[in-house]
Image: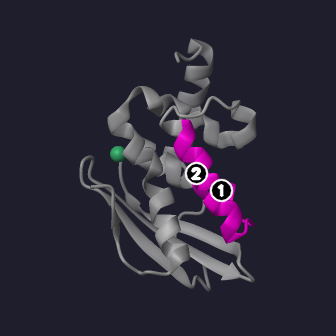
Amino acid sequence: MSMDPELRDLYQTMILDHYKKPRHYGRPAGADREAEGVNPLCGDEIHVYAKLVNDRIEEIGFEGSGCAISTAAASLMTDAVKGLTTGEVEALIERFHDLVTGQSHESGSELGKLAVLAGVREFPARVKCATLAWHALRAALEGTGEPVSTE
Ligand code: ZN
């Protein structure tokens, strides 16, 4: 599925904006969950922090370094999951994964701003960049404390 060039330009602009000005960067006060995600293929490292209150993400943050896609994806993720329950996050992870791997053609509005990453489906190597923060978040919420790797 090819993307409308105008939409592609808009998405590129939004991705660069999140890359240059990441939202929720840093460890939030009171964070009680965390996990590290690494994508050796690209060299991305994303550390995700969360504070859970009654099974709901009250605070979220991330640190790390990586390419524009992995950083923008982490920033967009923090915006999307703040205030959600762990069950809602799990459902969102599945839908986001389907979006970036091209298994879903649901409209962008369903996933909100996360849809700006839909273009990575045309670049399979970048899918791991886009999903890295989500893998780390899942590990953090499961409380394993184990680093996750895309490889
Ligand atoms: Zn990357």
Residue at 36 percent of width and 34 percent of height: 124
Image quadrant of ligand 1 equals top left
Q: Amino acid at mark 2?
A: Glu
Residue at 52 percent of width and 15 percent of height: 2
Residue 142 visible here: yes
Q: Main secondary structure of the magenta part?
A: helix
Label 2 sits on a secondary structure element that is helix
Image coordinates of residue 21 in percent, x first then y, are 55, 50
Q: Amino acid at mark 1?
A: Ala
Measure the C-alpha gap from mark 2 to mark 1. Answer: 5 Å
Image coordinates of residue 65 in percent, x first then y, are 36, 57
Tell me whether the residue at label 2 lies in contact with that at label 1, contact meaning CB atoms closer than 8 angstroms: yes
Where does label 2 land, which residue?
Answer: 94
Q: Is mark 1 within 8 Å of ligand 1?
A: no
**Range of residues picked out in magenta:** 76-99
Where does label 1 land, which residue?
Answer: 91
Say if the magenta span includes residue 84: yes
Image coordinates of residue 125 in percent, x first then y, are 32, 37
